[in-house]
């Protein structure tokens, strides 16, 4: 029997077409392999319906996005890095930097890279330049191993129409001791499609911080992004992502990390901004002895909605994944975390851990957490959990009796809640930034 739904309840698609894809390739004078990738992605996008009642989407209502405002790709208007708040430009992973790449409205406005990195053969540049100058390397990795166009409707759209991004390649046996930093900032409403591709080859090492932010706007915006982190055998890749889009931005992103044999992947993901964020965050342990740790921080207030969908795939024996997300919600905000640990058959002696801890700061907020296991091996150590709590009045009253104001007392208790997560973050300035974001949400 057919089911009739109100037109307004069905998600509408942004108004792009094949000519937009062709024009983008022509504008950038792209090589044939990239044109083919874009066209393959576009064909997949046209075949797929807009996500609606699939399991990973059925709790997420994004039908209130106004695509007439949010679909036009932002055109740079000459703004420079001067428009970016100082906190977003501050290096958080070290006093010295190996490189800094700044985008405003999808255009490069600042670029620098240390000689000591280029002398080692480390590539740190924007993705469009990398396509022209290092096409053989980019072709090997771009949306072929981590995020793929067939991963979903928005992954396919991204594959067809991404227009800016960053490319990092650290050759085998090289250590990029100085951290890299990328800042993506938007001044105008509209759409941006940014891509991060970071490849750390066998026995190599690198650290990168990426920050997303935008100025306040009354019109709606969208960010349709992809992040690919690839750590080769015995590599060490550390990655920090902080997102603070304005309250009229809708983010749809696919993010995936791959860890090879005996590799170490340490991934920190902070979500503070946007009206709605739908992020798929996935790690694949593909080599024996691979170790992936993912630390997630989120804090929603007012009418924000964060939907974070995580997955840990054990595709080799003797692999470890460790995921800890901690979040809070206040006012009428809503958060949703869906987690899954998966193993293939015969992938014995794996250790998978996933926990999401939630702190509800108002009666009208809603937080949902859905952990899951799909294990096809029998000699494993896998655990999953979700916890929920509220602020207890007793410690707040105790602090207030010592002369501390109620907002400050609440902040101290909330800081204690997040401390377990913050201690996993190896960078003091990142911890300080997250604490600043907490303070801004609580005190203003």
Image (cartoon, rainbow, N blue to C red):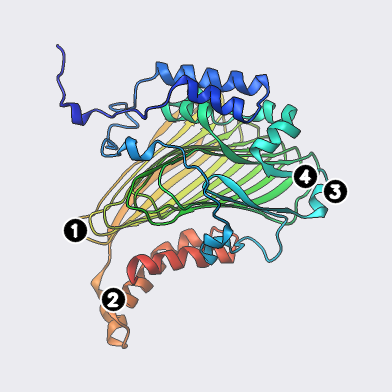
Report which residue position mark 2 lands on: 396
Residue ID for mark 1: 363
Q: Is residue 395 above or below residue 5?
A: below
Distance from the alpha carbon under mark 2 to that under mark 1: 18 Å
Instruction: Find disc 4 in the rendering and name its residue.
Output: 122
Q: Position of residue 417 (x, y in %)?
A: 39, 64
Q: Look at the numbered disc 4 and give the secondary structure of its residue.
A: loop
The span from disc 1 to disc 3 (Cα, nearest Å) is: 57 Å
Q: Residue at x 47, y 63 (%)?
A: 434
Which residue lies under the disc numbered 3?
119
The answer to whether marks 1 and 3 mark residues whose Cβ atoms lie closer than 8 Å is no
Label 3: how many Cα within 10 Å (few below 14, some 14–19, many 20+): few
Relative to residue 10, is residue 443 depicted above or below? below
297 on left or right of 1: right
Q: Nearer the viewer, residue 228 or 78?
A: 78
Q: In which quadrant is the N terminus drawn?
A: top left
C-alpha gap between disc 2 and disc 3 = 55 Å
Q: Residue at x 54, y 44 (%)?
A: 106
Task: Report the mark closest to the observer, 1 or 4.
Answer: 4
User: Which residue is farthest front?
Assistant: 77
**Residue contact at pointers 2 and 4, CB within 8 angstroms:** no
- Secondary structure category for the residue under label 3: loop
Identity of the residue furthest to the top in this view:
1
Indicate which disc, 2 or 4, sits on the residue closer to the N terminus: 4
> Position of 3 compared to 360: left or right?
left
Q: Tell me: residue 280, above or below residue 299.
A: above
Separation of residues labelled 3 and 4 (CA atoms): 7 Å
């Amino acid at each position: 029997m057919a089911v009739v739904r109100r037109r307004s309840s069905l998600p509408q698609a942004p108004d792009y077409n094949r000519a937009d894809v062709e024009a983008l390739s022509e504008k950038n004078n792209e090589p044939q392999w990239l044109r083919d990738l874009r066209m393959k992605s576009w064909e997949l996008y046209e075949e797929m319906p807009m996500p609606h009642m699939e399991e990973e989407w059925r709790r997420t209502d994004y039908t209130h996005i106004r695509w007439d405002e949010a679909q036009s790709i932002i055109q740079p208007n000459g703004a420079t890095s001067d428009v970016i708040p100082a906190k977003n430009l501050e290096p958080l992973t070290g006093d010295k930097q190996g490189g800094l790449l700044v985008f405003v409205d999808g255009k490069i406005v600042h670029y620098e890279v240390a000689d000591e990195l280029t002398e080692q053969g480390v590539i740190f540049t924007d993705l469009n330049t990398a396509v022209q100058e290092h096409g053989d390397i980019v072709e090997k990795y771009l949306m072929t191993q981590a995020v793929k166009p067939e991963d979903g409707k928005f992954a396919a759209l991204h594959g067809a129409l991404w227009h800016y991004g960053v490319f990092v390649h650290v050759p085998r046996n090289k250590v990029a001791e100085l951290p890299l930093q990328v800042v993506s900032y938007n001044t105008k409403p509209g759409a941006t499609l940014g891509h991060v591709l970071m490849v750390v080859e066998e026995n190599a090492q690198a650290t990168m911080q990426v920050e997303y932010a935008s100025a306040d706007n009354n019109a709606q915006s969208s960010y349709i992004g992809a992040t690919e982190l690839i750590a080769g055998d015995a590599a060490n890749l550390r990655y920090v992502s902080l997102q603070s889009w304005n309250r009229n931005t809708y983010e749809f992103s696919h993010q995936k990390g791959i860890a090879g044999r005996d590799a170490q992947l340490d991934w920190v993901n902070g979500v503070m901004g946007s009206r709605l964020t739908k992020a798929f965050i996935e790690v694949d342990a593909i080599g024996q002895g691979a170790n992936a740790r993912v630390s997630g921080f989120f804090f929603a207030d007012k009418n924000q909605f964060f939907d974070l969908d995580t997955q840990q795939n054990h595709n080799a024996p003797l692999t470890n994944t460790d995921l800890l997300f901690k979040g809070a919600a206040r006012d009428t905000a809503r958060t949703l975390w869906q987690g899954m640990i998966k193993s293939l058959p015969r992938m014995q002696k794996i250790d998978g851990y996933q926990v999401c801890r939630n702190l509800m700061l108002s009666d009208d907020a809603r937080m949902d957490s859905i952990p899951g296991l799909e294990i096809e091996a029998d000699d494993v150590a896998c655990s999953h959990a979700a916890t929920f709590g509220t602020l207890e009045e007793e410690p707040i009253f105790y602090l207030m009796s010592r002369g501390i104001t109620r907002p400050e007392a609440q902040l101290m208790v909330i800081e204690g809640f997040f401390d377990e997560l913050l201690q996993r973050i190896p960078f003091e300035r990142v911890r300080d930034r997250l604490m600043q974001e907490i303070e801004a949400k609580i005190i203003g």
